[in-house]
Amino acid sequence: MRARRVWAVVPAAGRGERFGGGRPKQYETLAGRAVIEWSVSALLACRDVVGVMVALAGDDRDWSTLAIASDHRVHTCRGGKHRSDSVLAGLEALHELNADDTDPVLVHDAARPAVTAAAIEALIRGADGPSGGLLALPVADTLKRGEAGESVATAERSGLWAAQTPQMFPLGTLREALREGRAQGVAVTDEAQAMERRGYRPRLVAGEAGNIKLTRRGDRVLLEAILHSRTRGQTE
Ligand code: CTP
Ligand code: MG
């Protein structure tokens, strides 16, 4: 039997409008490293991951300055207008590296730097079927429906999960699901949604609370604290 190969696609072609600032948020330095270096390194720390395809904006100026850009397992391609276009471009580019349609692919946001190799490995073990799976956490807060700044209803929380990345699916199945979403003009916000639309039921694998996405300026403080505690843990 051939050794198991897991690939990864990292969408990193966004502009970070909500985060603001001059440079896309994936290149912010947190605890001494660029956000995207943390994200890609966590994937590379997993034994089964044989290659990472990073989807970059056409006018990206920062990637080539990073040490990780010269890692032999890391490759780049041109991303697209929406996140799902960047992911699809990454999947298509994996074929040039001789990836098979049956190989599993992890899709992980460049903007989630605090994911751990342990969580990724739990996903690889837990989502290894035809429907794939995703890291997610049961929603803990009470959910309110707001109208004009006022709370008008309380949503039923049971059964609701907050989706994270990575999400993992067989390459060929995910590519066809994303192509179908695009052809139908549906804006899918994650890979699991594209799969659900085709009738698959991706497995929910319990993630970690620290795996937050750098979205707004205020997310910096918490992420930096989490990442700092990791670097301290390594040196002590
Ligand atoms: N992304 C991408 N291609 C796009 C849009 C987003 O590769 N056309 C990537 C981002 O770089 C990020 C991930 O998808 O790593 C998650 O998206 P998000 O957090 O929404 O990042 P941005 O789209 O950059 O931020 P914003 O929505 O605030 O502009
Ligand atoms: Mg976005």
Image (cartoon, grey):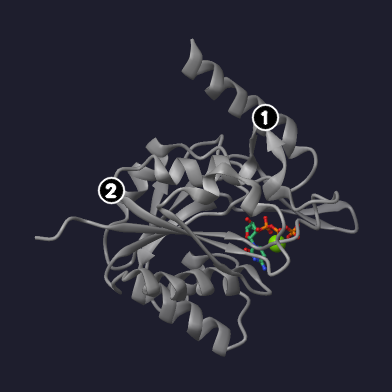
* Residue type indicated by callout 1: Glu
> In the image, 21: left or right of 34?
right
Nearer the camera: disc 1 or disc 2:
1
Amino acid at the residue labelled 2: Arg
Is residue 200 among what the camera can see?
no
Relative to 222, say whether 235 is above or below.
Answer: above
Residue farthest toward the right in the current orientation of the protein? 148
Quote the CA–CA distance across marks 1 and 2: 29 Å
Asked if disc 2 is less than 8 Å from ligand 1, the answer is no
The percent position of residue 224, horizontal first and vertical second, equals 67, 29
Q: Quadrant of ligand 1?
A: bottom right
- Outermost residue, top side: 236
Judge whether 186 appears above or below 60 on screen: below
State left or right for residue 147 relative to residue 213: right
The image position of residue 53, as x and y in percent, is: 47, 61
- For disc 2, the neighbor class at 10 Å (few under 14, some 14 to 19, many from 20) is few
Where residue 212 sits, quadrant-wise, is top right
> Which mark identifies residue 224?
1
- Residue at 32%, 69% (x, y): give it: 99
Q: Residue furthest bottom?
A: 183
Q: Which residue ends up furthest to the left in the rendered image?
A: 1
Disc 1, SS:
helix
Image coordinates for residue 117, horizontal then vertical, percent? 41, 38
Residue 67 showing in the rendered view? yes
Q: Is residue 211 left or right of residue 128?
A: right
Quadrant hosting residue 175: bottom left
Residue pictured at 60% horizontal, 67% vertical: 189
Is the shortest distance between ligand 1 and the CB of mark 1 under 8 Å? no
Q: Which mark is residue 125?
A: 2
Sooner in the amino-acid sequence: mark 1 or mark 2: 2
Helix, strand or loop under label 2? helix
